[in-house]
Amino acid sequence: MLINESYCREKFTGVAERPGMNAYAQNAHVLLYPDGMVRLNESAGAVLNEVDGQRSVEDIVETLEKKLPEARSLMTDVWYVLKAAEQKSWIEIR
């Protein structure tokens, strides 16, 4: 799937219930929401931890690429994590 560059400027924010990220409960990234919790893998946790409702996908990718300079371009991976989170109603696109 090719990434439309307009997606890079879209903003992501948590759903209305404001689920929280908790890295302490199980020594892992855990997404808490009213109906339960989801344990995230390290990659998904790193991506969703950068979501603040203000930053674009491009901003999130840039931050992660600075933290992981040995990684290849992360745009596709970050985009897939965000789209999966949106489909599960963990975040919404504004």
Image (tube, rainbow, N blue to C red):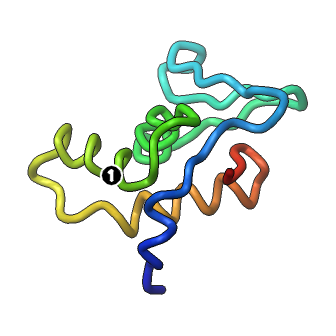
70 with respect to 94 (left or right)? left
Residue 19 quadrant: top right
61 with respect to 86 (left or right)? left
Residue 68 quadrant: top left
Q: Is residue 31 above or below residue 68?
A: above
Residue 43: where, in percent of width, then height? 41, 46
Q: Residue at x 64, y 39 (%)?
A: 13
* Secondary element at tag 1: helix
Looking at this view, is 94 or 21 the one in front? 94
Residue lying furthest right: 35
Residue bearing mark 1: 61
Residue 9: where, in percent of width, then height? 47, 58
Check disc 1 and give the amino acid type: Val
Looking at this view, is 92 or 84 the one in front? 92
Residue 65: where, in percent of width, then height? 21, 48
Q: Residue at x 59, y 24 (%)?
A: 21
Local packing at callout 1 (Cα closer than 10 Å; few below 14, some 14-19, many 20+) is many
Looking at this view, is 43 or 64 the one in front? 64
Q: How many marks?
A: 1
Q: Is residue 42 above or below residue 19?
A: below
Residue lying furthest top: 24
Q: Is residue 31 above or below residue 78?
A: above
Residue 8: where, in percent of width, then height? 44, 62
Q: Residue at x 44, y 78 (%)?
A: 3
Residue lying furthest left: 70
